[in-house]
Image (cartoon, rainbow, N blue to C red):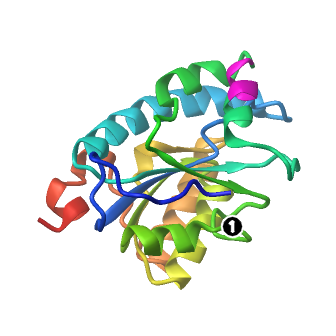
C-alpha cells in the first residue's frame, strides 16, 4: 500500500520528477542472491548520492518493493526483516527510507502492476520517472516497459541498476535504449533542470 501522498515542507505539491528505487530493500535470500548483492552494493552507493540530490530539490522518493508473497506485510516490516539479513543490511544502511519518503509494495515484477503507483504519481504531479534498482533485466525492465506505456519520460541511469551478470545488465540497457528510447546515461549526467524543469 502506498503511503498517503500529502505535501510536507520538504516536498513540492507538484513536481516534475520522482526517484523510484526498485527492490533495493532486499534480503537476497534466493539462488544467485549473493552475486546480485555484490553487484548491487556499488549501485546502492550511487543511488544514495542521487537520492540526496533529488531530496535537496524537494522531489519525491518512492520505494517499490516486493511483498515476498506476504499480502499482509508492512513496508516497515520488510525493511526490518531485510536489515537483519547479512546480505541486505549494507544496502539498507545506505538507503534506509526517511520519514517523508513514499513506498509501494508490489506482488510482481513491475512496480505498476496491481499497485497504487500510478495514482501516487498523478497525485504528486510527476511526469518524469528516474528508475533505479534491481534487477536491470527483470523488475527494472518490467517497470520501465509499463512506465513507457503510461507515457512517462523515463531515466534509467546505468550506474544505478544491477543484474546477476554484466551481460544481462548490458542486454537490458540496450533494449531500453533502442526499443523504448530510455535515457540511460550515468546518474552524474542528470541535471537539476532535467529533474525539475527549472
On the image, the x and y values in percent for residue 44 come to: 49, 33
Q: Residues within 10 Å of mark 1 (few under 14, many from 20)?
A: some
Against 172, is 186 above or below? above
Residue nearest the observer in this picture, 11 or 177: 11
Residue 84 picture location, percent across and down = 73, 17
Is 81 magenta? The answer is yes
Residue 186 vs residue 9, the one in the foreground: 9
Residue found at the very far left of the displayed protein = 198
On screen, residue 48 above or below 182: above
Q: Is residue 54 left or right of residue 69?
A: left
Residue drawn at point x = 54 percent, y = 58 percent:
4
Give residue 173's position: percent from left, percent from top: 51, 60
**What percent of the width, then of the height, locates residue 177?**
44, 69
Residue placed at 75% from the left, 31% from the top? 28
Q: Name the magenta segment's main secondary structure.
A: helix
Figure quadrant of the C terminus: bottom left
The N terminus - image quarter: bottom right
Q: Disc 1 on helix, strand or loop?
A: loop
**Residue matched to label 1:** 115
89 lies left or right of 153: right
Q: Is 139 a magenta residue?
A: no
Q: Is residue 187 left or right of residue 123?
A: left
Residue found 65% across the figure and 41% down from its top? 165
Q: Nearer the viewer, residue 144 or 174?
A: 144
Magenta stretch: give its range. 80-84
Amino acid at each position: 500500500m502506498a503511503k498517503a501522498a500529502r505535501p510536507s515542507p520538504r516536498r513540492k505539491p507538484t513536481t516534475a520528477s520522482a526517484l523510484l528505487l526498485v527492490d533495493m530493500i532486499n534480503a537476497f535470500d534466493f539462488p544467485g542472491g549473493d552475486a546480485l548483492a555484490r553487484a548491487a552494493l556499488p549501485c546502492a552507493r550511487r543511488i544514495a548520492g542521487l537520492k540526496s540530490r533529488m531530496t535537496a530539490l524537494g522531489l519525491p522518493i518512492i520505494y517499490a518493493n516486493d511483498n515476498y508473497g506476504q499480502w499482509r506485510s508492512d513496508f516497515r516490516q520488510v525493511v526490518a526483516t531485510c536489515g537483519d539479513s547479512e546480505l541486505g543490511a549494507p544496502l539498507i544502511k545506505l538507503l534506509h527510507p526517511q520519514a517523508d519518503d513514499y513506498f509501494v509494495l508490489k506482488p510482481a515484477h513491475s512496480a505498476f502492476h496491481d499497485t497504487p503507483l500510478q495514482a501516487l504519481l498523478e497525485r504528486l504531479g510527476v511526469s518524469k520517472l528516474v528508475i533505479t534498482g534491481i534487477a536491470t533485466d527483470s523488475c527494472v525492465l518490467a517497470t520501465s516497459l509499463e512506465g513507457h506505456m503510461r507515457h512517462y519520460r523515463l531515466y534509467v541511469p546505468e550506474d544505478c541498476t544491477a543484474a546477476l551478470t554484466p551481460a544481462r545488465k548490458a542486454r537490458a540497457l540496450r533494449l531500453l535504449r533502442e526499443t523504448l528510447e530510455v535515457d540511460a546515461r550515468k546518474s552524474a549526467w542528470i541535471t537539476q533542470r532535467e529533474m525539475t524543469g527549472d
